[in-house]
Amino acid sequence: MELRLGARDAEAALLDRCRAAARGEVRAAQNQREANVFCLSAMVLRPRFPSESMCLMRLSEEYFASHPDEKLQSQDVVRRGWVANLPRLRDMLSHRLKGD
């Protein structure tokens, strides 16, 4: 039996994973979804959290070096429902990073 997370639980889990990646606690993106969300997170966080942004971007670039055909445009990541929208991603992730 497969455990299916609700939309909010799935978003929270992904944000927690982004937070861990931004803090250097993650060694690699696990899949296409993570790599694309890490890339978007890096872009939206760059002005407020430059070092965390660099960690996220490095992980996404490492993933895409091996899987170049899996990189998506920002609007496609949103269209697939991996993030609700970029301002929400920025705000929710900023809140998690400030909580430390």
Image: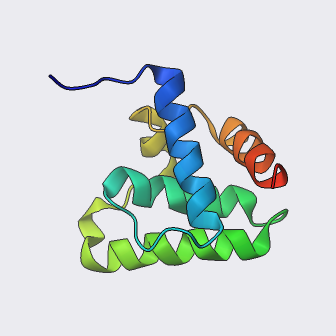
Q: Report whether 56 appears left or right of 34.
A: right
Q: Report whether 24 appears left or right of 93.
A: left
Q: Position of residue 82 (x, y in %)?
A: 45, 38
Who's the residue at 66% across and 62% down the image? Answer: 43
- Number of on-image labels: 0
Quarter of the figure with residue 89: top right
Q: Position of residue 28 (x, y in %)?
A: 40, 71
Looking at the rendered image, the quarter that the C terminus falls into is: bottom right
Q: Is residue 99 visible?
A: yes
State how the image is colored.
Answer: rainbow
Q: Is residue 58 above or below residue 96?
A: below
Direction left: furthest residue:
1
Who's the residue at 14% across and 22% down the image? Answer: 1
Quarter of the figure with residue 69: bottom left
Q: Is residue 78 above or below residue 29?
A: above
Who's the residue at 60% across and 75% down the image? Answer: 55
Q: Is residue 64 above or below residue 84?
A: below
Who's the residue at 52% across and 78% down the image? Answer: 58
Q: Report whether 84 appears left or right of 44.
A: left
- The residue closer to the viewer here, 37 or 98, is 98
Q: Position of residue 98 (x, y in %)?
A: 84, 52
Q: Is residue 15 above or below residue 23?
A: above
Q: Position of residue 30 (x, y in %)?
A: 33, 60
Q: Is residue 83 visible?
A: no
